[in-house]
Image (cartoon, rainbow, N blue to C red):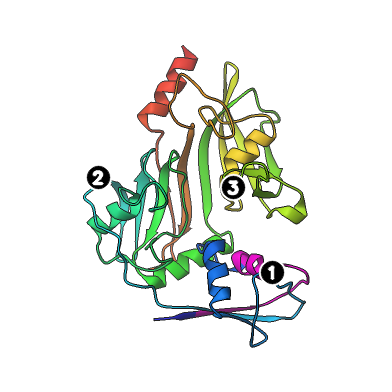
Amino acid sequence: METRHSFTADTAGLRLDKAIASQLEGISRARIQRLIEQGLVRVNSLVSKPSYRLDKGDEVVITIPEPEPSHLIAQKIPIQIIYEDKDILVVDKPAGLSVHPGPGHPDSTLVNAVLGYAPQVCGGEAGRPGIVHRLDKDTSGLIIIALNPESHVYLANQFKTRQVKKTYTALVRGNLAPATGFIDAPIGRDRSHRKKMAVTSAGNGRLARTGYRVMEYISSYTLLQAMPETGRTHQIRVHLAAIGHPILGDTTYGFHSSLLSRQFLHASSLIFKLPSSGDKVEFSSPLPQDLEKVIGALRS
């Protein structure tokens, strides 16, 4: 069944595809551009282009068609489920597991594992049933899976309005000071390396804000909690690298470490409202063994 979303532009000058991306959490820019090109987005009842610059007061209506039959396969991949009800799963994802299929990894992802556990899962983008937010392949920790379209919309709205509180644990190079603070810097595609993100000027990136709190100084490293207020691709990794404190083991934005074969980044806490009841809940995940071993080695 198709769904419709609408909004009124409150400022002028923003590209249509960027404006829609800011309104609809969990839908990629590429898909938004396809919807526009297919005539499924109308501005003041007229078909437009992704590059159209909105005027203040423009009425935008987006029609999202019913997903096409999925060719995804269900796979019996062990996953740790820490909460389950009729609407959602909360999964403690291990490092090394991609969230959804993509180039180079057509299967053996979290989506395939969820389909093997709950074949009824649906809602969200085609090819990514149940996915409301993402974790990088080599980031471990908590992720929410929506089991039906209604819960997907409910959760996506919480992410869009920044009601979901996420906390990550990271180990970075250097002694970060002050002990608490915010990194407020827009993030966009790195113009020199298209597969990377970077801090950019305001006109070339999207608003990105990350709070942090130092937990412990360990030798020449800092163990900290990072609390992203926005959900940009690689946000925590890019922000910490930009202020001179890259994450240990992050070979894209940081540095290789003989102590660890992946980045020291773990999604340790989630606070959000349940679709079934509206009750606010909190889930937490302890550091996995490989990260604990690194801390132990540095302390000794």
Query: Residue 11 colored magenta?
Result: yes
Q: Please indicate whether residue 289 sits to the left or right of residue 56 in the image.
A: left
Q: Are marks 2 and 1 in contact (CB under 8 Å)?
A: no
Lower position in the chain sequence, tag 3 or tag 1: 1
Q: What x and y, as percent, mark residue 86?
A: 30, 66
What kind of residue is marked 2? Pro
| Mark 2 secondary-structure assignment | loop
User: Number of callouts in the render?
Assistant: 3
Q: Position of residue 13 (x, y in %)?
A: 77, 69
Residue type at mark 1?
A: Ser
Residue corresponding to mark 2: 78
Residue 51 - label: 1
Q: Nearer the viewer, mark 2 or mark 1?
A: 1
Label drawn at residue 228: 3
Q: Magenta stretch?
A: 4-22
Viewport quadrant of the N terminus: bottom left
